[in-house]
Image (cartoon, rainbow, N blue to C red):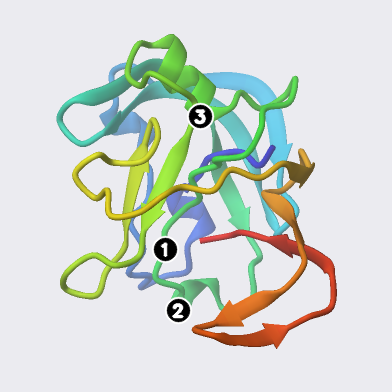
């Protein structure tokens, strides 16, 4: 699984417009004596703190990466600040969805994206698909790998036309 990580101020270039995690502001922040490194060029220390998604979803004592080095090419121009790891857990990195379920914040360790949101932006729903969004059937498929959200791909259709016919694997990333 990929860890959830937030940038620390030391990882950002001077004048950066990115929001960063400031542990000195938190009364619940704790340093974990363990390093983390992801596959994309981010490293730092593991930390533990309360994590909230909006006013009603909270995990007390969530482990995440506190990035002190970000060497992602072009990061200063990216629109994201950090990464919310929605993958499977490992012994070193606890899975976010499982932590939310254990804290009683969601019923199942699942998530859904709605890319049809009015205004042109996307919406992430934690705990499964949003009943308010509805509008269709869900297709459940087995994953090819537990390291990534990868599925077997037989073909891609655009309307009534087949665009890709060669079988292979497709990986989802938002």
Which residue in the structure is indicated by mark 2? 77
Is label 1 in a helix, a strand or a loop?
Answer: loop
Q: Which residue is drawn at the image coordinates 72% and 64% (left, top)?
A: 170
Relative to 152, residue 51 above or below: above
Q: CA distance from mark 1 to mark 3?
A: 18 Å
Q: CA distance from mark 3 to mark 2?
A: 26 Å
Along the viewing direction, whichever of 51 and 138 lies nearer the viewer: 138
First reached walking from the N terminus: tag 3 or tag 2 = 2
Which residue in the structure is indicated by mark 3? 96
Residue positioned most to the right: 167
Q: CA distance from mark 1 to mark 2?
A: 9 Å
Quarter where residue 167 is shown: bottom right
Residue 30 appears in the rendering? no
Residue 80: numbered disc: 1
Relative to 156, residue 133 above or below: above
Relative to 117, residue 125 above or below: above
Q: Which residue is drawn at the image coordinates 31% and 63% (left, top)?
A: 122
Q: Is residue 56 left or right of residue 25?
A: left
Q: Residues within 10 Å of mark 1 (few under 14, many from 20)?
A: few
Is label 2 in a helix, a strand or a loop?
Answer: helix
Q: Which residue is drawn at the image coordinates 48% and 33% (left, top)?
A: 110
Q: Which residue is drawn at the image coordinates 41% and 49% (left, top)?
A: 137
Q: Residues within 10 Å of mark 2 (few under 14, many from 20)?
A: few
Quarter where residue 2 is shown: top right
Along the viewing direction, whichever of 20 and 91 lies nearer the viewer: 91
CB within 8 Å, label 1 to label 3: no
Q: Split into 4 quadrants, where in the image is the N terminus?
A: top right
């Amino acid at each position: 699984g990929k860890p959830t990580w937030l940038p620390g101020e030391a990882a950002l270039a001077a004048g950066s417009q990115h929001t960063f995690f400031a542990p000195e502001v938190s009364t619940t922040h704790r340093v974990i004596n363990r390093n983390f490194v992801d596959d994309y060029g981010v490293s730092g220390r593991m930390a533990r703190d309360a994590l909230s998604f909006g006013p009603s979803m909270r995990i007390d004592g969530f482990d995440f990466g506190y990035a002190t080095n970000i060497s992602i090419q072009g990061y200063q121009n990216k629109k994201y600040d950090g990464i919310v790891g929605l993958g499977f857990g490992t012994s070193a990195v606890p899975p976010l969805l499982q932590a939310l379920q254990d804290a009683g914040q969601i019923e199942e360790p699942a998530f859904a994206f709605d890319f049809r949101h009015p205004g042109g932006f996307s919406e992430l729903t934690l705990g499964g698909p949003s009943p308010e969004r509805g509008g269709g059937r869900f297709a459940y498929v087995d994953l090819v790998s537990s390291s990534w959200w990868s599925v077997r791909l037989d073909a891609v259709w655009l309307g009534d036309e087949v665009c890709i016919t060669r079988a292979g694997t497709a990986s989802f990333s938002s």
